[in-house]
Image (tube, rainbow, N blue to C red):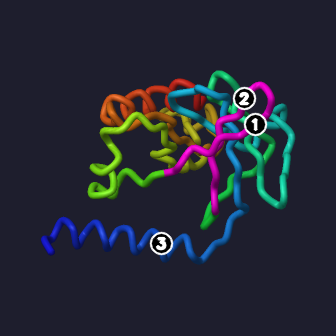
Protein backbone atom coordinates (compact mmCIF):
# COMPACT_ATOMS: atom_id res chain seq x y z
CA UNK A 1 0.00 0.00 0.00
CA UNK A 2 1.50 3.33 -0.99
CA UNK A 3 1.90 6.24 1.43
CA UNK A 4 -0.89 8.34 -0.08
CA UNK A 5 -3.38 5.50 0.31
CA UNK A 6 -2.21 4.93 3.91
CA UNK A 7 -2.67 8.64 4.63
CA UNK A 8 -6.21 8.57 3.18
CA UNK A 9 -7.16 5.62 5.39
CA UNK A 10 -5.60 7.32 8.42
CA UNK A 11 -7.58 10.53 7.81
CA UNK A 12 -10.81 8.56 7.36
CA UNK A 13 -10.10 6.61 10.56
CA UNK A 14 -9.51 9.84 12.51
CA UNK A 15 -12.76 11.32 11.18
CA UNK A 16 -14.73 8.19 12.03
CA UNK A 17 -13.26 8.00 15.53
CA UNK A 18 -13.93 11.65 16.28
CA UNK A 19 -17.50 11.47 14.97
CA UNK A 20 -18.19 8.21 16.80
CA UNK A 21 -17.94 10.07 20.08
CA UNK A 22 -21.03 12.13 19.31
CA UNK A 23 -24.39 10.83 18.09
CA UNK A 24 -26.50 13.30 16.14
CA UNK A 25 -30.15 13.22 15.19
CA UNK A 26 -30.84 11.29 11.98
CA UNK A 27 -32.11 13.37 9.05
CA UNK A 28 -34.33 13.06 6.00
CA UNK A 29 -33.67 15.57 3.21
CA UNK A 30 -36.66 16.12 0.92
CA UNK A 31 -35.64 17.65 -2.39
CA UNK A 32 -37.98 18.88 -5.16
CA UNK A 33 -38.23 16.29 -7.93
CA UNK A 34 -35.72 16.91 -10.71
CA UNK A 35 -33.55 19.33 -8.71
CA UNK A 36 -29.88 19.15 -9.72
CA UNK A 37 -27.27 21.29 -8.02
CA UNK A 38 -26.01 22.49 -4.67
CA UNK A 39 -28.08 22.47 -1.52
CA UNK A 40 -27.43 24.60 1.55
CA UNK A 41 -29.10 24.16 4.95
CA UNK A 42 -28.49 27.17 7.22
CA UNK A 43 -29.15 26.63 10.95
CA UNK A 44 -30.26 28.93 13.79
CA UNK A 45 -32.53 31.06 11.61
CA UNK A 46 -35.10 32.78 13.84
CA UNK A 47 -37.47 33.30 10.89
CA UNK A 48 -36.52 30.00 9.24
CA UNK A 49 -38.65 26.93 8.69
CA UNK A 50 -39.92 25.48 11.98
CA UNK A 51 -38.47 22.26 13.34
CA UNK A 52 -40.18 19.17 11.92
CA UNK A 53 -39.71 15.49 12.82
CA UNK A 54 -40.85 12.24 11.24
CA UNK A 55 -40.37 9.00 13.18
CA UNK A 56 -37.72 10.69 15.36
CA UNK A 57 -35.73 12.04 12.38
CA UNK A 58 -35.22 15.67 11.45
CA UNK A 59 -36.98 16.67 8.24
CA UNK A 60 -35.30 19.18 5.95
CA UNK A 61 -37.71 20.29 3.20
CA UNK A 62 -35.42 21.84 0.60
CA UNK A 63 -37.11 24.64 -1.40
CA UNK A 64 -36.84 25.09 -5.17
CA UNK A 65 -33.85 27.47 -4.83
CA UNK A 66 -31.81 24.88 -2.90
CA UNK A 67 -31.38 27.04 0.23
CA UNK A 68 -33.18 25.98 3.41
CA UNK A 69 -33.12 28.33 6.37
CA UNK A 70 -34.18 26.40 9.45
CA UNK A 71 -34.78 26.97 13.13
CA UNK A 72 -32.91 23.73 13.89
CA UNK A 73 -29.56 24.00 15.64
CA UNK A 74 -26.52 22.41 13.92
CA UNK A 75 -26.46 18.64 13.94
CA UNK A 76 -22.88 17.44 14.33
CA UNK A 77 -21.75 13.85 14.85
CA UNK A 78 -22.66 10.41 13.57
CA UNK A 79 -26.03 10.32 11.88
CA UNK A 80 -28.00 8.39 9.32
CA UNK A 81 -29.19 10.66 6.57
CA UNK A 82 -31.52 9.93 3.72
CA UNK A 83 -32.11 11.90 0.55
CA UNK A 84 -35.37 11.78 -1.42
CA UNK A 85 -36.85 13.48 -4.44
CA UNK A 86 -40.44 14.52 -3.69
CA UNK A 87 -42.99 14.98 -6.47
CA UNK A 88 -46.17 17.12 -6.47
CA UNK A 89 -48.14 14.21 -4.97
CA UNK A 90 -45.56 13.99 -2.12
CA UNK A 91 -44.31 10.61 -3.34
CA UNK A 92 -40.66 9.97 -2.49
CA UNK A 93 -37.89 8.47 -4.60
CA UNK A 94 -34.65 7.75 -2.76
CA UNK A 95 -31.45 9.42 -3.95
CA UNK A 96 -28.41 7.29 -3.03
CA UNK A 97 -25.61 8.97 -1.09
CA UNK A 98 -22.00 8.31 -2.17
CA UNK A 99 -18.68 9.22 -0.64
CA UNK A 100 -16.72 10.64 -3.57
CA UNK A 101 -13.37 10.36 -1.79
CA UNK A 102 -13.49 6.60 -2.43
CA UNK A 103 -11.92 6.63 -5.92
CA UNK A 104 -12.51 2.94 -6.57
CA UNK A 105 -16.25 3.19 -5.84
CA UNK A 106 -16.47 6.50 -7.68
CA UNK A 107 -14.98 5.02 -10.87
CA UNK A 108 -17.61 2.28 -10.83
CA UNK A 109 -20.52 4.74 -10.84
CA UNK A 110 -19.08 7.83 -12.54
CA UNK A 111 -20.18 6.95 -16.07
CA UNK A 112 -23.86 6.26 -15.46
CA UNK A 113 -26.76 8.71 -15.63
CA UNK A 114 -28.08 8.00 -12.14
CA UNK A 115 -28.51 10.90 -9.70
CA UNK A 116 -26.66 10.83 -6.37
CA UNK A 117 -26.26 12.98 -3.29
CA UNK A 118 -22.61 13.69 -2.47
CA UNK A 119 -20.04 16.19 -1.14
CA UNK A 120 -21.87 16.70 2.09
CA UNK A 121 -19.96 18.73 4.63
CA UNK A 122 -20.59 21.02 7.58
CA UNK A 123 -19.72 24.69 7.78
CA UNK A 124 -19.13 26.13 11.24
CA UNK A 125 -20.02 29.54 12.58
CA UNK A 126 -17.85 32.30 11.12
CA UNK A 127 -17.33 35.66 12.83
CA UNK A 128 -15.99 38.56 10.76
CA UNK A 129 -14.21 41.40 12.58
CA UNK A 130 -13.00 44.79 11.42
CA UNK A 131 -9.19 44.43 11.24
CA UNK A 132 -8.64 47.99 12.51
CA UNK A 133 -11.15 48.24 15.35
CA UNK A 134 -11.69 44.55 16.09
CA UNK A 135 -15.44 45.29 16.01
CA UNK A 136 -17.70 42.34 15.17
CA UNK A 137 -19.08 43.01 11.67
CA UNK A 138 -21.10 39.88 10.97
CA UNK A 139 -21.75 36.29 11.96
CA UNK A 140 -22.38 33.52 9.44
CA UNK A 141 -24.47 30.80 11.04
CA UNK A 142 -23.46 27.13 10.88
CA UNK A 143 -24.66 25.30 7.79
CA UNK A 144 -24.53 22.01 5.89
CA UNK A 145 -24.10 21.69 2.18
CA UNK A 146 -24.32 18.83 -0.32
CA UNK A 147 -24.70 18.32 -4.04
CA UNK A 148 -27.32 16.47 -6.11
CA UNK A 149 -26.10 15.31 -9.52
CA UNK A 150 -24.93 12.43 -11.71
CA UNK A 151 -21.12 12.56 -11.18
CA UNK A 152 -20.29 12.92 -14.90
CA UNK A 153 -18.89 16.44 -14.51
CA UNK A 154 -17.79 16.03 -10.91
CA UNK A 155 -14.99 18.63 -11.01
CA UNK A 156 -17.24 21.28 -12.59
CA UNK A 157 -20.01 20.43 -10.10
CA UNK A 158 -17.63 20.85 -7.17
CA UNK A 159 -16.69 24.35 -8.33
CA UNK A 160 -20.40 25.15 -8.74
CA UNK A 161 -21.10 23.93 -5.21
CA UNK A 162 -18.35 26.10 -3.74
CA UNK A 163 -19.62 29.18 -5.61
CA UNK A 164 -23.24 28.46 -4.61
CA UNK A 165 -22.29 28.00 -0.95
CA UNK A 166 -20.30 31.23 -0.75
CA UNK A 167 -23.02 33.17 -2.59
CA UNK A 168 -25.86 32.04 -0.29
CA UNK A 169 -24.11 31.60 3.07
CA UNK A 170 -24.00 35.20 4.24
Label 2 Cα crowd, 10 Å radius (few <14 / some 14-19 / many 20+): some
As drawn, 65 above or below 60:
above
Please give the residue where the numbered disc 3 appears in the rendered image.
16
Is residue 6 rendered to the left or right of residue 144? left
Residue 99 belongs to magenta span: no
Dot 2 lies on which element?
Answer: loop
Return the x and y of residue 79 as percentages of the image width and height: 63, 63
Is residue 5 rendered to the left or right of residue 65? left
As drawn, 14 above or below 61:
below
Tell which of 154 and 137 is nearer to you: 154
Is residue 55 rendered to the left or right of residue 73? right
Of callouts 3 and 2, which one flags the residue occurring earlier in the amino acid sequence?
3
- Quadrant of res 152: top left
Return the x and y of residue 51 as percentages of the image width and height: 85, 46
Q: Which mark is residue 18?
A: none
Magenta stretch: give its range.
80-97
As drawn, 164 above or below 123:
above
Distance between mark 1 and mark 2 Cα atoms: 6 Å
Please give the residue where the numbered disc 1 appears in the rendered image.
91
Is residue 33 rendered to the left or right of residue 49? left
Distance between mark 3 and mark 2 Cα atoms: 34 Å
Q: The C terminus lies in which quarter of the figure?
A: top right
Tell which of 75 and 158 is nearer to you: 158
Q: Which mark is residue 87?
A: 2
Of callouts 1 and 3, which one flags the residue occurring earlier in the amino acid sequence?
3
Q: Residue at x 72, y 29 (%)?
A: 87
Amino acid sequence: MNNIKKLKYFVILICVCSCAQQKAEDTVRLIPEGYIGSVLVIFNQENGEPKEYEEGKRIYRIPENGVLKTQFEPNYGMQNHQFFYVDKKRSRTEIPFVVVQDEEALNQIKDNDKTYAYWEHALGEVRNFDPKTNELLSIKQPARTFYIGNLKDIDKEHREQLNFTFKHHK
